Image (spheres, rainbow, N blue to C red):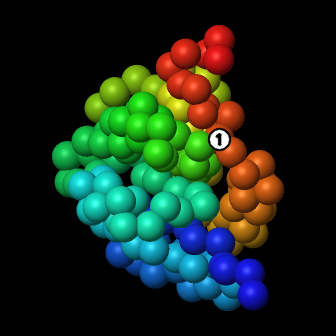
């Protein structure tokens, strides 16, 4: 029997997490939840997921901890191959830093971006794309020559 693909959701919005979990599990995926990057790191160590859905900003101050989580994860060979789908409200909110997925995405080791609010159809399309990709395009980040 094939195991369900495991998707680690690292997101601090409990309502969004509940909605994504419901959507993903209705399609046969196993959703594992972490409400901040520290908890995400702990869940990552317990069982390696097939995909990570990661928020950019955490907390009321809007700290961009998602960036650090992605970069640290890519430097660890045990986790470097896992595709990351990054959720961003940057197009609808003014963050405290200057970043655009369209222009700066190549410098951040995530495989795809999805704008908030997340539409269920868009989420499922991106998840399927990345699961079919199997290995992150950033496997050898930051050494792009490998």
**Which part of the image, by quadrant, shows the N terminus?**
bottom right
| Residue that appears at 64% across and 28% down | 102
- 144 shown above or below 35: above
Task: Inspect this view and state whether residue 94 appears.
Answer: no
- 13 shown above or below 142: below
| Residue that appears at 55% across and 16% down | 143
Task: Inspect this view and state whether residue 141 appears.
Answer: yes
- 35 shown above or below 129: below
| Residue that appears at 66% across and 79% down | 4
Residue 82, percent from left and from top: 57, 49
Residue 44, percent from left and from top: 39, 59
Q: Secondary structure at mark 1?
A: loop
For this orientation, the residue located farthest to the left is: 61
Residue 103, percent from left and from top: 61, 21
In this picture, residue 55 sits left or right of residue 2 = left
- 1 shown above or below 145: below
Badge count: 1
Residue 18, percent from left and from top: 46, 81
Quadrant position of residue 124: bottom right
Quadrant position of residue 128: bottom right
In this picture, residue 64 sits left or right of residue 136 = left
**Which part of the image, by quadrant, shows the C terminus?**
top right
For this orientation, the residue located farthest to the top is: 145
Residue hosting label 1 = 136
| Residue that appears at 34% across and 27% down | 97
Q: Which one is nearer the viewer's eye here, 11 or 81?
A: 81
In this picture, residue 105 sits left or right of residue 57 = right
Mark 1 is surrounded, within 10 Å at the Cα level, by few (under 14), some (14 to 19) or many (20 or more) other residues, namely: many
């Amino acid at each position: 029997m094939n195991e369900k693909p495991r998707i680690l959701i690292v997101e601090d919005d409990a309502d969004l997490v509940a909605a994504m979990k419901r959507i993903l599990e209705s399609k046969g995926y196993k959703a594992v939840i972490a409400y901040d990057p520290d908890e995400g790191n702990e869940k990552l160590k317990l069982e390696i997921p097939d995909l990570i859905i990661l928020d950019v900003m955490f907390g009321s101050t809007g700290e961009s901890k998602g960036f650090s989580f992605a970069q640290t994860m890519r430097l660890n060979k045990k986790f470097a191959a896992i595709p990351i789908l990054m959720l961003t409200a940057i197009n609808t909110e003014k963050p405290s830093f200057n970043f655009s997925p369209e222009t700066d995405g190549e410098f951040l080791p995530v495989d795809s971006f999805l704008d908030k609010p997340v539409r269920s159809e868009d989420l499922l399309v991106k998840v399927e794309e990345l699961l079919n990709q199997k290995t992150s395009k950033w496997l050898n980040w930051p050494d792009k020559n490998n």
